[in-house]
């Protein structure tokens, strides 16, 4: 896309609409902070959720001041400056909600465990009062009837919806990761000439750029794990059924699940604690065992001594630095006392995309979207045919902010088809997928391993521009092959940083465990995270001098 003044002309309309959606921003930022009992300073930059929570609980910082901090950064790096394109819309009620939380605290009334923590929610997740667009101009006026279940739970816990995050349009890239007709292409804060992956690119880039305390994305084939891994963050794809999908625009219900994007493993556990639980609105959550009420947070790190960790063999070779980082990670496992067990995947796991994922996803996409439009929102197009018409009309009228033509062709392929009633689809979901789950379970049982380890992506962030190609090395076209293990099995997987390339780009490593063993993942990942020299800071953004070390006035208790 042609670039004008650091922004895509194709998303110039978003700048205006973004400014309108956050029209109160300039006023809100101009209002003086509340007077403090005693002067002190606190820098929210790069802080983990436990650190932010402690500062809020101790009243060393107010919720309003924290929201303002992130809004200043949004104004500088989204409305102006480098334009990460991480956000589609700022919540105009964020400051008011922060003030209500501060008032409750000052009056000694109980507040929730996440009270005052602002977050970005991917724009395929319902937030009442804000449109759910899936990143598409076709759904720009689709207004939710109510909050998604997970959003309602986060709000009840006191978290503040700060913004809706940009995303790959309809959560499927078709060659353009992180691109939407509403928000343009999300840029990687570690190098704006690289992609932030997809499809939860906005929440990940936003958290990495310190535009919010945490993010919520959705993951079908790697859409939480990929963006988290290339932006130096922790991403969890939980067991399908642990967290409700009610109120989420689907891509493929057989594979979809929401998940948190955070700076640390402990932060991931904190958010999972609030979101997990059964929900009548999502029958899959009824499959979760009763012990899912187990406390995920605080995390009691498990010593690795005596643990058996399976390391997938026969992969690698795409990027030397990723391969070397993985070797270093395996050596660290052994130094900390773990037994490393080489694991070879059965032939059935060789081409999961073509053999089962694509056919199931293609069958489920249209009926899932049409059900969502009928039951969850008002003001949207009634069906897939009308979505396509709106997309095509947009492309005729606005050639500089097109819906990806390949995405339109993908939608057209779903018309005049009743694929969920086909024998092939029924065979896939009733026999092939259960068989793959059993095979993976048996593989781990036979090897007697607690978890499987592998690089989250076999290459660092992909180039977005010609400048981004400098020093890029990737000898594969399937850049997230191991992500498909969790997709087809529904097993939980966590990614966390395992190092940086010489060009300063994050690399992630994944641990995959048996169903509903998220606690195990948190416990294993905690000591590894603490031992790995990986990003724990906000990357320097263009024009960002002084922001990393910025401090804000806080209210110290008398």
Image (cartoon, rainbow, N blue to C red):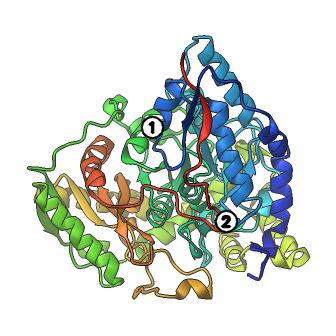
Q: Quadrant of residue 241?
A: top left
Q: Is residue 471 visible?
A: yes
From the top left corner, tell me how far across and down residue 257 is, in percent.
49, 51
**Residue 303 located left or right of residue 220:** left
Q: Is residue 37 left or right of residue 190?
A: right
The C terminus appears in which quarter of the rendering?
top right
Q: How many marks?
A: 2
Residue displayed at 51% across by 33% down: 279
Name the residue carrying label 1. Answer: 51
Label 2 crowd bin: few (<14), some (14–19), many (20+), radius 10 Å = few
**Residue 543, which numbered label?**
2
24 or 150, which lies in front?
24
The earlier-in-sequence mark between 2 and 1 is 1
Residue 254 appears left or right of 165: left
| Residue furthest to the front | 39
- C-alpha gap between disc 2 and disc 1: 27 Å
């Amino acid at each position: 896309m042609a670039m004008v003044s650091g922004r895509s002309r194709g998303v110039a309309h978003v700048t205006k609409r973004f400014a309108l959606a956050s029209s109160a921003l300039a006023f809100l930022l101009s209002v003086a902070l509340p007077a403090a009992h005693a002067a002190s300073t606190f820098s929210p930059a790069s802080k983990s959720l436990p650190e932010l929570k402690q500062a809020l609980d101790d009243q060393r910082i107010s919720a309003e001041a924290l929201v303002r901090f992130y809004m200043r950064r949004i104004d500088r790096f989204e409305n102006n400056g480098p334009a990460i394109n991480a956000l589609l819309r700022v919540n105009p009620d964020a400051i008011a909600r922060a003030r209500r939380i501060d008032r409750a605290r000052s009056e000694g009334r109980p507040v929730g465990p996440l009270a005052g923590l602002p977050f970005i929610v991917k724009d395929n997740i319902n937030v009442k009062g804000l449109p759910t667009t899936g990143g598409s101009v076709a759904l720009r006026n689709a207004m939710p009837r109510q909050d998604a279940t997970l959003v309602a739970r986060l709000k009840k816990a006191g978290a503040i919806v700060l913004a809706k995050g940009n995303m790959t349009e309809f959560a499927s890239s078709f060659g353009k990761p992180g691109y939407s007709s509403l928000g343009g292409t999300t840029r990687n804060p570690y190098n704006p000439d690289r992609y932030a992956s997809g499809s939860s690119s906005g929440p990940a880039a936003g958290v990495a750029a310190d535009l919010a305390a945490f993010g919520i994305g959705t993951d079908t084939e790697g859409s939480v794990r990929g963006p988290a891994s290339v932006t130096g963050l922790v991403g969890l794809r939980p067991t399908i059924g642990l967290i409700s999908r009610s109120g989420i625009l689907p891509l493929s219900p057989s594979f979809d699940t929401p998940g948190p994007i955070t700076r640390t493993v402990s932060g991931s556990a904190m958010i999972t604690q609030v979101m997990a639980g059964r929900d009548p609105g999502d029958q899959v959550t009824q499959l979760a065992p009763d012990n899912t009420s187990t406390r995920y947070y605080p995390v009691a790190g498990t010593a690795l001594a005596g643990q058996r960790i399976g390391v997938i063999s026969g992969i690698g070779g795409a990027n030397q630095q990723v391969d070397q980082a993985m070797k270093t990670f395996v050596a660290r496992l052994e130094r900390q006392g773990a037994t490393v067990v080489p694991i070879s995947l059965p032939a059935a796991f060789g081409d999961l995309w073509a053999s089962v994922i694509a056919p199931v996803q293609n069958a489920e996409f249209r009926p899932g979207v049409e059900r969502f439009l009928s039951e969850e929102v008002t003001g949207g197009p009634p069906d897939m045919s009308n979505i396509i018409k709106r997309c095509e009309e947009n492309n005729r009228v606005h050639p500089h902010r097109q819906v990806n033509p390949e995405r339109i062709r993908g939608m057209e392929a779903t018309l005049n088809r009743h694929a969920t009633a086909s024998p092939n689809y029924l065979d896939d979901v009733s026999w092939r997928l259960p068989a793959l789950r059993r095979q993976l379970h048996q593989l781990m049982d036979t090897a007697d391993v607690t978890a499987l380890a592998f690089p989250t992506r076999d290459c660092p962030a992909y180039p977005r521009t010609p400048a981004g190609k400098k020093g890029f090395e990737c000898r594969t076209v399937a850049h997230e092959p191991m992500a498909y293990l969790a997709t087809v099995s529904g097993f939980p997987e966590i990614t966390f940083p395992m190092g940086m390339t010489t060009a300063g780009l994050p690399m992630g490593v994944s641990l995959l465990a048996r169903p509903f063993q998220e606690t195990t993942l948190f416990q294993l990942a905690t000591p590894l995270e603490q031992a790995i020299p990986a990003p724990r800071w906000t990357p320097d953004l263009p024009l960002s001098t002084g922001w990393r070390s910025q401090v804000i006035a806080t209210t110290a208790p008398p």
